[in-house]
Image: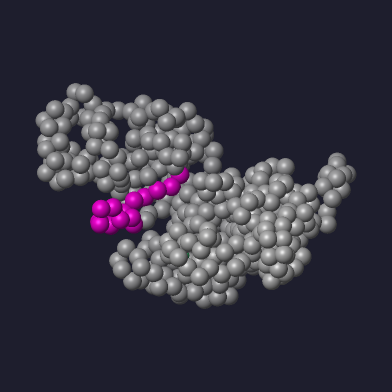
Amino acid sequence: MSDTQDVSEHAASIAEEVDADTDEVEERLRNLLEYSVPLEEAERTVRRRYGSEGAEPEDAETADLGDLSTDDTRVSAEAVVVSAGARSIRVDGEDTVITEGELSDETGVISYTAWDELSVEAGDTVRVEGEVREWDGEPQVNIDSDADVIHADADIEPEREPYGVRSVAELKAGDRAVTVEVGVVDSEEKEINGRDGETTITSGTFGDPSGRLPFTDWENRSLDEGGSVRVENAYVNEYRGIPQVNMGGYTTVETSEDIDVSHTPPETDIAEAVEKGGDFDVVVRGNALTVKEGSGIVERCPDCGRVVQKGQCRVHGDVDAESDMRTKAVLDDGTGAVTLVVGRELTEELYGGSLEDAREEARDAMDKTVVTESIADNTVGRRWRVRGNVSVGDYGANMNVSEMEEADDDPADTAREVLDEF
Ligand SMILES: [Zn+2]
């Protein structure tokens, strides 16, 4: 499909059909193909672009952003640029710059992506034209080139104001063109095998008064632990189910005045953490509903740490497995549920004995499930305060637990306190 000659032939035939310049048509077609738009759809898009009559691009109807749906194909709108960031991505071995961010008018907010470096900044009022495409179930505008953005002087009161400095707690995966002022909590260089072979990156944790998040700087700038920085044009993605701040070649980093960093993990509802697509180092309180199968004594591969069955690792085959303990328990706080993944040390506390004690109990009973039952007896039906990272994946939400203690608050008391405030 991306065969050069093939695309040229398709472009030539469309150019003839719509009476347009072949090179221009081919460029538009290649732009779309680079973003993995299927050839047929790319051809339709290019044809529509020129209208059925040929040379002149079709005028899209001016729309309110709040009215757009994924059924729309093309839109023209006047809006305020809420955010605008550039980043370099690699498609088929070539580096390409894309611009992305959000637009807002009185009626709504929509994210946009451009195949080009756009000459816009947050706060600009523009008239844009582009394709409407579906992204994560929502409409998004895809802008072909800088020529499709015209600076306008319309008086728009946007539903969402252009972003200033964002707080760490409000960031979520998918946020683009992000500005933060943060303290560097920890920072270390790592060698990775990246797209250009061995390369050094910096990763660690940022924080501000609202919370903390992991970051990765792909440009390996020196970020000193304990220092404070202003970061502009970063983007947030999900890494292992948790939002992460990414800094690329278009991100700027400068020293800022000292930023206070919260070292108290924020308390959150399970529903809120799941809604954000995961959350870093938070506290939830809820009731343990069940302890899942696979809790208690497990055997792990010494090479990769995977849980093995009958001494067989899925990757390393026959191995000399090592015993470990873990608990997987479902915690519910009334807004939602997560599976707590609890490591050896805390599981030993839940069990009320060491791994050696547990192995001895299992040997005596000739049954490992006695250990699982003891853990369940001590865990289920109790209310817990749990700290850790929440990650959301295909199999639901998990929380990798770093602290777990019985919650001393009584939900009935909490409810009364809330009522007393009225
Ligand atoms: Zn293994």
Is residue 91 in the magenta section? Answer: yes
Left or right: residue 149 versus residue 175 is left
Task: Examine the rendered structure and indicate whether residue 50 appears above or below residue 288.
Answer: above
Q: Position of residue 25 (x, y in %)?
A: 18, 38
Residue 75 colored in magenta in the image: no
Please provide percent x and percent y for residue 277. 55, 48
Which colour assignment does the render follow? one colour
Quarter of the figure that contains the C terminus: top right
**68 or 43, nearer to the observer:** 43
What residue is at 49 percent from the left and 74 percent from the top? Answer: 188
How many marks on residues? Answer: 0
Instruction: Name the residue at 30% across, 28% down.
Output: 59
Expressed as whole percent of the image width and height from the top left, the position of residue 68 reads 45, 30
Residue 219 point in image, percent of width and height: 39, 68
Outermost residue toward the top in this view: 53
Q: Quadrant of the N terminus?
A: top left
**Left or right: 370 as drawn, with respect to 189:** right
Magenta highlight range: 88-102
Quarter of the image where one finds residue 42: top left
Q: Which image quadrant is residue 242 in? A: bottom right
Decide if residue 247 is in sight here: no
Majority SS type along the magenta span:
strand
Q: Is residue 338 visible?
A: yes
The residue drawn where x is 33% and y is 28% is 60
Question: Residue drawn 54% across and 38% down?
Answer: 159
